[in-house]
Amino acid sequence: VTEVVLIDIPEGQEKVSINTAFAKRMAEKAGLPISVRYTLDRREGLKDASFVIAQIRVGGLDAREKDERIPLKYDVIGQETTGPGGFFKALRTIPVMLSICRDIEEVCKDAWLINFTNPSGIITEAILKNTKVKCIGLCNVPTIAMMAEPKLLGKDISQLNYRYAGINHFHWHKVFDENGND
């Protein structure tokens, strides 16, 4: 890695400038010769990229609040990845992600897109079915479970074996100790 470019929309300029300065300090402190900058011009920022990591929230936190409150009004649970709220978010987000993918196809066609935008499964499937972009969808929920549960169980993570089914926020897992106990 020689360069990291953060890309945002004009409304996010203050936050992206803070995050860029923070990332620069981290690279300098680690002694890494990595250039860190930001741009509000998506195509310029994507130019010649090898990897693109996307985490966007179309509609901001106001939209997230509606995604979660409207279903609750009708006694339906869910959030930004599952249930009606997840579907609301997907409907807003897919067109924007496909627009980003069109830019990737034109200015960095060999890049891998690492999608961290929720609902990750739906967004990633839309990208894979509707573009030529190489894409992997990620979610940190399983990782967070693996970080928190060992302490709750009085174990070290090296003593536990995790078995997962499902995807992202809509998953189940079982945990087994070093003796195979559930």
Image (cartoon, grey):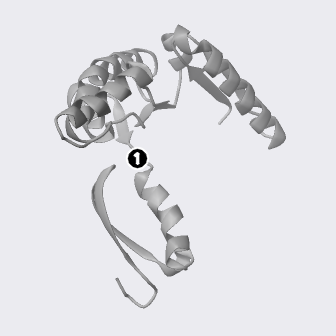
Q: Nearer the viewer, residue 12 or 106?
A: 12
Q: Residue 100, position in %: x, y?
A: 38, 19
Q: Which residue is mark 1?
A: 139
Q: Residue at x 26, y 33 (%)?
A: 85
Tell me if I can see residue 128 in this picture: no
Tell me if I can see residue 100 in this picture: yes
Quarter holding residue 21: top right
Q: Residue at x 48, y 64 (%)?
A: 146
Q: Residue at x 54, y 8 (%)?
A: 10
Q: Residues within 10 Å of mark 1 (few under 14, many from 20)?
A: some
Q: Give the residue type that dot 1 points to.
A: Cys
Q: Residue at x 37, y 87 (%)?
A: 181
Image quadrant occupied by the N terminus: top right
Q: Nearer the viewer, residue 69 or 33?
A: 69
Q: How many marks?
A: 1
Q: Secondary structure at mark 1?
A: loop
Quarter holding residue 161: bottom left
Q: Nearer the viewer, residue 155 or 42?
A: 155
Q: Is residue 127 left or right of residue 36?
A: left
Q: Residue 4, position in %: x, y?
A: 63, 28
Q: Is residue 148 above or below residue 130?
A: below
Q: Is residue 37 above or below residue 55?
A: above
Quarter holding residue 177: bottom left
Extreme residue toward the left, this view: 74
Q: Is residue 22 above or below residue 159?
A: above
